[in-house]
Amino acid sequence: MAVPKRRTSKMKKRLRRSGQRWRAAKFKSCPECGNAVPSHIACPSCGFYRDRQVLSVDAM
């Protein structure tokens, strides 16, 4: 069974784990209505996704 020869330093451990940090979600604007929408999600306000109507949204 392999055993590490040296202890992993704090800096190496933190550099390795820096990619696991939390990041805020990035939003793009809907080309139809202009509202902020996450990527790869149909717009909840107008129902468009990739320039097509995929959801029927009732107007209030």
Image (tube, rainbow, N blue to C red):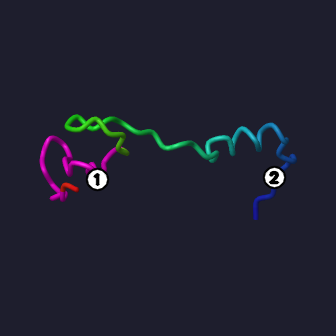
Q: Nearer the viewer, residue 59 or 26?
A: 59
Judged from this view, the residue extending furthest toward the bottom is 1
Q: Are marks 1 and 2 in contact (CB under 8 Å)?
A: no
Q: Is residue 56 magenta?
A: yes
Residue at (31% x, 48% y) in the render? 40
Q: Nearer the viewer, residue 38 or 19?
A: 38
Q: Quadrant of the C terminus?
A: bottom left
* The stretch drawn in magenta includes residue 33: no
Return the residue found at the far left: 52
Q: Earlier in the sequence, mark 1 or mark 2?
A: 2
Secondary structure state at the residue bearing disc 1: loop
Mark 2 burial class by Cα count in 10 Å: few <14, some 14-19, many 20+:
few
Q: Is residue 7 left or right of residue 14?
A: right
Above or below residue 38? Residue 55 is: below
The range drawn in magenta is: 39-58
Element marked by disc 2: loop
Q: Position of residue 8 (x, y in %)?
A: 82, 45
Q: Position of residue 59 (x, y in %)?
A: 19, 55
Residue drawn at x 18%, y 43% as measured from the top left: 50
- Relative to 56, is 20 above or below? above
**Residue under the image location 87 percent in, 46 percent down:** 6
On residue 44, which mark appears? 1
**Res 4 label:** 2
